[in-house]
Amino acid sequence: MAEKKRLLSGVKPTGKPHIGNYFGAMRQFADLQQQYDSFVFVADYHALTTPHSQKNPQEIREAIKDVVRTYIAIGIDPSTTTIFKQSDVVEHTELAWLFECITTMPYLMRAHAFKDAEAKNKEISVGTFNYPMLMAADILMYDPAVVPVGRDQQQHVEYARDTAEKFNNLYGATFAVPEHIIIEGAAIVPGTDGQKMSKSYNNTIPLFASDEETLKAVMSIVTDSSGDVPANVYAIHKLFKTEAELAPIYKANKGQYKVLKDALAADINAYLAPMRKKYNAITDDEVKKVLADGAVKAKAIASAKMAEVRQKVGVSL
């Protein structure tokens, strides 16, 4: 039997996961885990680039646990998928430094996160500026064939590919050059205001909220009074039912936005009920065990890779 190709991806622990996280990327982790030798991690060091995170270490801890619970609740099996925490594998930051040494500032200034922060006249931390290199290290450390991401994260995979090729050209074949996987049609999930669903926009529908909280979020969806079909409501509804299933509902309730929002909230709650039950049953001890087991496997691979890298760049005697 041929050895499975490796898959790697991760999620940053910044607040409660929402349906945009799930449909945009995380569902792929569960769908693909039988096809690939899967590694999914909690990108906790990436979460520290925001000033808010530096003032709220306990929130970071809780958000880390939320991500692990989410992984398990959506169907990722820790017995077949390696789930680990970025900060538990110190080789990530070491490799990021080596990548930074072969990367120019103009190249990093092309990054979307940097350009967005610059456009908003924010004071930009070195961590934010160097973010793509830590992301490249996260990816390339494990030589994955594929990296499932939301479309807004596609550039990070492109940076990783560029970095792998540059390092390989300088020091000889060392890193695999990965491909990204994006589910077309669900790559960018609209938020309650019609923009991309994002915690930073405060326009999310939480993945593990109560039925009442889901209904409240759905009722806040911005609607366009000029049409029979509320576009934002319909765009989200398509994630939970097929267009064939939705057609008679929207035809029978043209212009009745409250009825359609009620229907959307009911469908969201029905779809997510099994995941929510599983999520709420996972204990802190279970989370810690999953991360401890995952760290052992991830660190073994990272340690071997870094031994090779140190030899290649000349720091091993």
Image (cartoon, rainbow, N blue to C red):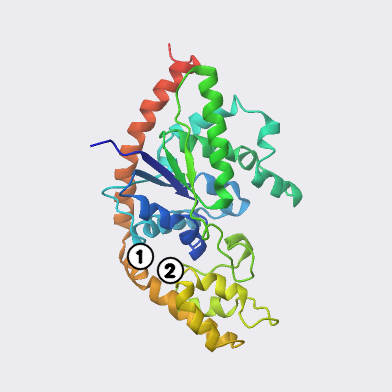
Asked if one can make out residue 277 in the rendered structure from this viewpoint, the answer is: yes
Q: Amino acid at mark 1?
A: Tyr
Front residue of 56/280: it is 280
Q: Secondary structure at mark 2?
A: loop
User: Does 290 sit left or right of 60 as displayed?
Assistant: left
Q: How would you rate the neighbour count of disc 1 (Cα within 10 Å): few for under 14, some for 14-19, many for 20 or more?
A: some
Front residue of 215/262: it is 262
Front residue of 168/214: it is 168
User: Does 140 sit left or right of 227 as displayed?
Assistant: left
Q: Secondary structure at mark 1?
A: helix
Badge 2 is on which residue? 208
Disc nearer the start of the sequence (1/2): 2
Badge 1 is on which residue? 279
Instruction: Determine the residue positioned at 35% across, 65% down.
Output: 279
Q: Amino acid at mark 2?
A: Phe
Vertical order, 115 against 176 (above or below): below
Q: Position of residue 287 (x, y in %)?
A: 33, 54
Instruction: Determine the residue positioned at 68% across, 39% down.
Output: 110
As measured in the structure, the alpha-carbon distance from the residue carrying label 1 to the one carrying label 2 is 8 Å
**Quadrant placement of the N terminus:** top left
Q: Position of residue 75 (x, y in %)?
A: 33, 59
Tell me if label 1 and label 2 are in contact, CB under 8 Å: yes
User: Does 180 sit left or right of 195 as displayed?
Assistant: left
Instruction: Determine the residue positioned at 59% across, 43% down.
Output: 155
Asked if one can make out residue 98 in the rendered structure from this viewpoint, the answer is: no
